[in-house]
């Protein structure tokens, strides 16, 4: 008797918060994308993923975080982030040549799998993996600490959250989203996605959502320039919101109060952006055009500055690389790789 792969996966021990953005964040991004992709894109994805269930994208949204810890998938560990060797909070920026190592990064990986998922010379099994990676990496690239080298993406900045010892990376991935939503089940993700979808269509994100799609080039096969823009967009929040007074100002601190209050609008907006952009990306892959399921006038605006209760605005900072500090970069890279291989007792994935 053969056991369906989905059933096997559900037998794996479930480790809450062990996934980048956490299960809640990744599943929510996937559900938002499901809400916006065209029906022909949905059919394409369901066929490739061999899943016609109501959670066909969400069901595979954290596969990449399990796969990276298998010996077969270990090569993909560096694909979950780009280690920007910038200097927060003074200067935030991402420089592809400086920050994407020879082993690859989230920007190069998205480009690779974007090409592979459509390539006639790639097997169906590998195309299926490519799609699962795209769904996951579009989520990862929107988590500011996935676009930052500082303290191994915040993994070595110990903090407490609601009295529990953890680290800065982990609270951005999981503790803060889970506090907002009150759980991390598939249903929690679906409900959060419904809310954020409504915020995009008619709520606080309506005026700025069109700007989120800016830079998506339907004629560029690998989309690398676009995902680099997204990495820069997320990285800017490291300076403005993640460590606005520097790492030492949060080290050892309890962050459930005022810090959480400032972070949560950015977290919600980054999840919303990731889902909306993933939908556009998948539509380009499947249909060759963005064509999201919203009325045209809803995405004909220019850049907005945010409104309503969220008010975090779109921060795409002009970037300038200050200096190349090769040694610092190599040290950061080694430290990050070590984390990728040994995720520790709490499973601090990055
Ligand atoms: C698709 O999934 C079904 C179970 O849902 C399974 O029986 C079938 O073998 C799968 N097909 C492929 C090509 O993986
Ligand atoms: C592209 O993906 C394939 C399959 O996962 C992998 O073997 C290869 O190393 C990747 N190349 C780059 C440049 O990321
Ligand atoms: C941070 O916490 C971890 C796990 O509790 C511990 O092993 C490590 O030594 C701590 N680091 C610092 C700098 O306190
Ligand atoms: C989303 O949820 C928030 C918090 O519960 C609520 O204030 C807001 O009105 C909801 N947005 C929509 C569009 O339903
Ligand atoms: Zn990841």
Image (cartoon, grey):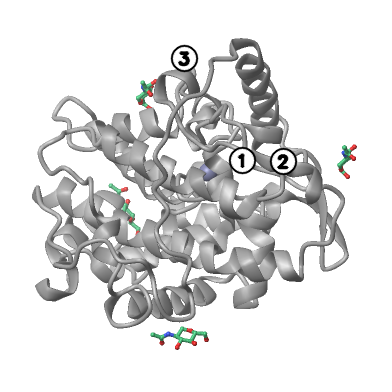
Residue 84 drawn above or below residue 214? above
Residue wearing tag 2: 155
Residue at 59% x, 44% y is 145
Q: Is mark 1 within 8 Å of ligand 5?
A: yes
Neighbor class of circle 1 (other Cα within 10 Å; few <14, some 14-19, many 20+) is many
Which residue is at 36% across, 67% downward?
32
Where residue 321 sits in the image (x, y, percent)? 47, 25
Q: Earlier in the sequence, mark 1 or mark 3?
A: 3
Q: Nearer the viewer, residue 237 or 291?
A: 237
Residue at the image position 16 percent from the left and 42 percent from the top? 217
Q: Residue at x 30, y 57 (%)?
A: 212
Question: Is label 3 in a helix, a strand or a loop?
Answer: loop
Where residue 118 appears, as percent x and y from the top left, is: 18, 36
Mark 3 Cα-neighbour bin, 10 Å: few <14, some 14–19, many ≥20: few
Discs 1, 3 touching: Cβ within 8 Å: no
Q: Which image quadrant: the C terminus?
A: top right
Q: Are marks 2 and 1 in contact (CB under 8 Å)?
A: yes
Q: Which residue is the site of mark 1?
A: 350
What whole-number distance in Å separates the C-alpha atoms at marks 1 and 3? 18 Å
Q: Disc 3 designates what residue? A: 102
Instruction: State left or right for residue 72 relative to residue 197.
Output: right
| Residue 71 spot, x, y in % from top left | 58, 26
In the rendered image, the vertical position of residue 114 relative to residue 105, given as above or below:
below
- The answer to whether one can see residue 215 in this image is yes
Q: Which label's residue is closer to the chain start, 3 or 2?
A: 3
Q: Nearer the viewer, mark 2 or mark 1?
A: 2
Mark earlier in primary sequence (2, 1)? 2
């Amino acid at each position: 008797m053969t056991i369906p792969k989905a059933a096997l996966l559900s037998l794996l021990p479930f480790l809450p918060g062990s996934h980048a953005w956490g299960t809640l964040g990744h599943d929510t991004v996937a559900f938002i994308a499901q809400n916006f992709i065209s029906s022909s894109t949905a059919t394409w994805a369901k066929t490739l993923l061999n899943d016609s269930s109501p959670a066909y994208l969400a069901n595979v949204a954290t596969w990449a975080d399990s796969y990276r810890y298998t010996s077969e998938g270990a090569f993909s560990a560096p694909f979950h982030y780009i280690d920007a060797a910038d200097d927060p909070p003074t200067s935030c920026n991402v420089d592809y040549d400086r920050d994407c190592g020879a082993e690859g990064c989230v920007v190069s990986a998205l480009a690779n799998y974007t090409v592979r998922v459509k390539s006639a010379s790639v097997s169906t099994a590998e195309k299926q993996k490519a799609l699962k990676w795209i769904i996951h990496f579009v989520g990862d690239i929107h988590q500011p600490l996935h676009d930052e080298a500082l303290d191994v993406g915040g993994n070595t900045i110990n903090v407490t959250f609601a009295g529990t010892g953890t680290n800065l990376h982990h609270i951005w991935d999981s503790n803060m989203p889970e506090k907002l939503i009150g759980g991390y089940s598939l249903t929690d993700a679906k409900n959060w996605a419904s809310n954020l979808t409504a915020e995009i269509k008619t709520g606080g994100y309506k005026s700025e959502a069109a700007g989120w799609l800016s830079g998506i080039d339907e004629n560029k096969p690998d989309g690398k320039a676009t995902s680099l823009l997204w990495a820069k967009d997320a990285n800017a929040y490291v300076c403005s919101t993640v460590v606005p007074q520097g790492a030492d100002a949060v080290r050892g601190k309890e962050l459930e109060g005022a810090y959480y209050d400032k972070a949560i609008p950015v977290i919600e907006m980054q999840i919303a952006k990731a889902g909306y952009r993933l939908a556009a990306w998948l539509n380009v892959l499947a249909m060759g055009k963005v064509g999201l399921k919203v009325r045209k006038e809803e995405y004909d605006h220019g850049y907005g500055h945010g409104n309503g209760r969220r008010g975090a605005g779109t921060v795409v900072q002009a970037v300038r690389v200050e200096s190349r500090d090769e040694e610092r970069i190599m040290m950061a890279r080694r430290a990050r790789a070590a984390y990728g291989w040994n995720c520790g007792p709490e499973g601090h994935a990055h």
